[in-house]
Amino acid sequence: MNKRTLAGLLGVGILVLAALFAPVLTPYAPNTQSVVERLTAPSVKHILGTDELGRDVLSRMLYGGRVSMSVGIIAVLIATFIGLLVGALAGYYGGVMDNIIMRTVDIILTIPTLFVILMLVVFLGPSITNIMIIIGLTSWPDIARIIRAEVMSIKKAPYIDATRVLGLPKKMIIAKHIMPNALGPVFVYMIFGVSGAILTESGLSFLGLGVQPPAASWGNILSSGKDYIETGWWLTAFPGLAIFLAVFSYNLLGEGLRDFFNPKLSR
Amino acid sequence: MGKYVLKRLLLIFPVLIGITLITFAIIHLTPGGYTSVNMQMNIKVSPDSVARLKTLYGLDKPLHTQYLDWVSRVLRFDFGTSFIDQRPVMDKIYERLPATLLLNLISLVLIFIVGIGIGVASAVKNGGTFDKVMSVITFIGYSLPSFWLALLLMILFGVVLRWLPVSGMVSLGFDYMSPMQKIGDLILHLILPVFVTAFGGLAYISRYVKSSMVETLSQYYIKAAYAKGMPEKTVIYKSALKNSLLPVITLLGLSLPGLIGGSFIFETIFSWPGMGRLAYESALSFDYPVIMGVATIAAFLTLLGNLIADIAYALVDPRIRYR
């Protein structure tokens, strides 16, 4: 473990804990409005100020963190599930199957992902669940590629020949003997995937196509902040900082783990 | 070379089929199809235009006929008419295309010139002060949400300092300006959007160039060049640079989907009158034909970019042609 990994782990840990314990940590309910306290600057009473409806920004950000974290993690789990399945099939069977699958992946990668996401959001409607599914559905190709490469190299190993000689069924060879060894690099990618998903979700929410108000998310707080850039800087500064720190922590952790699994890359 | 280009051109067809299949699948993904709940609840969509849309997409025909119809329409660039103003979708896209191309091409050039510069400089003095500072900056750049960066820059340069315009492509009195003033006005409007668009890519490319250059510098032929007494500058800028830049050409192609996709966020923030903003506006008003049109055209542009990058790679690296 190097310093970067630890710092990343610390950051991610704090964010996850803050999201988990949001109801305990928040001094106010995230949706309680107060007409007299509209757009007040950070003070002792409201540490990060209030928004245009008099809601406490810190409380909303803690609840927003719940949304961002869960969207990031669940989207990546969906993507990993599809990627593992597709990548393992292509890598283990090779030949025609591999060719068809990998060409399909190439095609999917040429279509600008954000436009596909935009189309899907419009057709399916913006909601937290849909955003998770949509980001998951559009981010598996990279995982599939990584798994395929891993599986292809592992299946040539002598111990896999041994499982074949033992007469184990193919499903079992893939699931029990190949996959566990192919997961290292995927795990690293999953960490980067979470930060990517958080960025996408907050971008969509910022544009009003993601998490819908009154539910709080870092992106949609920022979105209301942009209407008050002259009078309420704290509405822009803090949620953006939260997104940045979350993405930064996940990236640090990802890089640290990558060097750990593959020391050659860290030059 | 001719054979390689031909082979590469033939590869376009499966990709085209894939693009049309995916867009077709999305049209049919909505429960109830293209003309369902969302549209009936949308007051801007009259029953008349729903009926027109049903005929346009031939929703009463069998699925394979519908798909073939869709492909033939895509090939003719016929995406129907907009729900909002009833104008042909392609007309609306043509209007917006130049603004998007201008913004993305300038950003792309900037990304590569500055990115390569930073990458090479960091690799030559690997582990030095410049390298260390740059690796921190690029790592931050990697993690910075670009739309937040856009907002912060708008606040700083637009609201606090009032140096730069924060929205649109030209000022109000653009039509009355002299040609020189027009160019100046356009450049002022370009600065922030170009910077924000280029920022993320810059971090990515400079890291890539650095690792590629470090790798090249450790090769035997570089040691041989030093051993025969070639001056360091010649070794670095003539022998090493050329070879380590080869893979960057591929990156040019790979970075296109991100750039074009990202344009819908940046163009919206900066009110830039391009294709991305058109897609966003259409998304908000459920203008399906326009969204489908923009997404398909964006995929075509990416495809074209990849093709150019691949052919350029084969031109400069003979090993690719003979593989």
Image (cartoon, coloured by chain):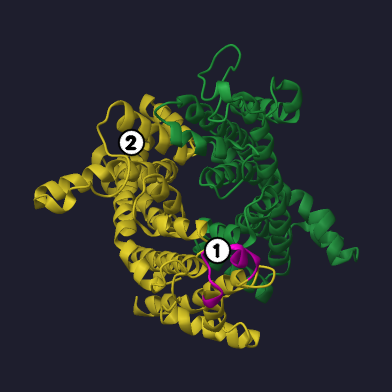
Chain colours: A green, B yellow
Residue A13 within the magenta-colored segment of the rendering: no
Q: Is residue A94 left or right of residue A220?
A: right
Q: Quadrant of the N terminus of chain B?
A: bottom left
Residue bearing the label numbered 2: B121
Checking the image for residue B19, the label placed there is none
Q: What residue type is labelled 2?
A: Ala
Q: Residues within 10 Å of mark 2 (few under 14, many from 20)?
A: some
Residue A262: x, y in percent?
A: 62, 41
Measured along the vertical axis of the image, is residue A236 above or below residue B44? above
Q: In this view, does B261 lie to the left or right of B169?
A: right
Question: Which residue appears at 42% of the width and 40% of the height?
Answer: B203
- Count of picture labels: 2
Q: Where is residue A169 in the image (x, y as percent from the top left)?
A: 88, 66
- At 61% from the left edge and 38% from the top edge, which residue is drawn? A217
Would residue A103 be visible to someone looking at this image? yes
Q: Which structural element holds mark 2?
A: helix
Kindly indicate the quadrant of the structure image that contains residue B269: top left
Callout 1: helix, strand or loop?
Answer: loop
- Point out which mark residue B43 bears: 1
In the visual, does A264 lie left or right of A12? Answer: left
Q: Which residue type does callout 1 highlight?
A: Ile
Of residue B210 and residue B86, the one placed in the foreground of this image is B86
> How far apart in space, not on screen, are marks 1 and 2 (Cα)?
58 Å
- Tell me the mark number nearer the camera, choosing from 1 and 2: 1
Q: What percent of the width, then of the height, locates residue B128?
A: 39, 26
For residue B276, above or below residue A242 = below
Answer whether residue B47 is magenta in the image. yes
Query: Which is nearer the eye, B2 or B190?
Result: B190
Q: Give the range drawn in magenta.
A: B36-48
View extreme (top): residue: A44
